[in-house]
Image (spheres, rainbow, N blue to C red):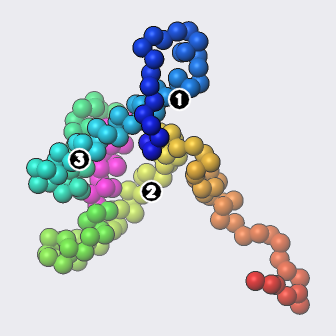
């Protein structure tokens, strides 16, 4: 995104289509375009007096409405619910100003935990859908057990461990 905008040649030859530079540039252009359109959508909704959170909720709702029933619609619904409930859980103003009772706030926290467990089996597929290279992801994304295991090597009794 911080590099200059790639240019796609007006005449696409066979060698151009097979060129890794063309292939990289065309995906870069699409990602840049999608991000610009998404930012413009949020800005437009904010210009109409909607908060960022509400604007993002509206985009989720529009995306859900555009998709027929199936796994994608279910995933969008799950992500939308998590988005809203996490904001309700983290923003104390909902509790402070009486929009939520303490019991309701506790119920929201429990529901967020349940939604996390529903999302967990799909987490790697969701991250992969963003096209983030593996090198940028933490080892925990691939093998939680190895990333969080203690080394089986124990210092011998009486040995000192330098820190």
From the viewer's perspective, is residue 21 above or below residue 125? above
1 vs 2, front mark? 1
Q: Earlier in the sequence, mark 1 or mark 3?
A: 1
Q: Are marks 1 and 2 in contact (CB under 8 Å)?
A: no
What is the spatial separation of the Cα atoms under label 1 and label 3, in whole angstroms?
27 Å
From the viewer's perspective, is residue 73 above or below residue 160? above
Give the residues in magenta: 71-85
**Residue 68 location, x and y as percent?**
28, 30
Crowd band around label 3 with a 10 angstrom C-alpha radius: few (<14), some (14–19), many (20+): many
Q: Earlier in the sequence, mark 1 or mark 2?
A: 1
Disc number at residue 42? 3
Q: Are marks 2 and 3 in contact (CB under 8 Å)?
A: no
Q: In percent of the image, x 24 and y 32: which residue is there?
A: 66
Pick the front one: 108 or 134: 134
Answer whether residue 82 is visible to the viewer in this image: yes
Pick the front one: 27 or 118: 27
Quadrant location of residue 143? bottom right
Pick the front one: 129 or 67: 129
Q: In percent of the image, x 38 and y 56: which residue is there?
A: 115
**Residue 42 location, x and y as percent?**
23, 47
Q: Main secondary structure of the magenta part?
A: helix
Q: Earlier in the sequence, mark 2 or mark 3?
A: 3
What is the spatial separation of the Cα atoms under label 2 and label 3, in whole angstroms?
29 Å
The quarter of the picture where the N terminus appears is top left
What is the spatial separation of the Cα atoms under label 1 and label 2, in whole angstroms?
36 Å
């Amino acid at each position: 995104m911080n590099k200059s905008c790639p240019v796609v040649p007006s005449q696409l030859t066979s060698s151009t289509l097979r060129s890794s530079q063309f292939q990289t540039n065309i995906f870069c252009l699409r990602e840049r375009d999608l991000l610009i359109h998404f930012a413009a959508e949020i800005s437009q909704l904010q210009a109409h007096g909607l908060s960022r959170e509400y604007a993002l909720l509206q985009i989720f709702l529009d995306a859900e409405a555009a998709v027929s029933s199936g796994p994608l619609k279910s995933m969008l619904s799950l992500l939308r619910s998590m988005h809203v409930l996490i904001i309700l859980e983290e923003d104390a103003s909902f509790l402070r100003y009486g929009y939520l009772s303490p019991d309701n706030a506790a119920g929201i926290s429990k529901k967020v935990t349940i939604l996390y467990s529903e999302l967990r089996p799909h987490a790697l597929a969701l991250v992969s859908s963003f096209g983030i290279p593996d090198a940028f992801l933490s080892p925990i994304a691939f093998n939680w057990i190895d990333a969080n295991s203690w080394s089986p090597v124990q210092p011998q009794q009486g040995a000192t461990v330098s820190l």
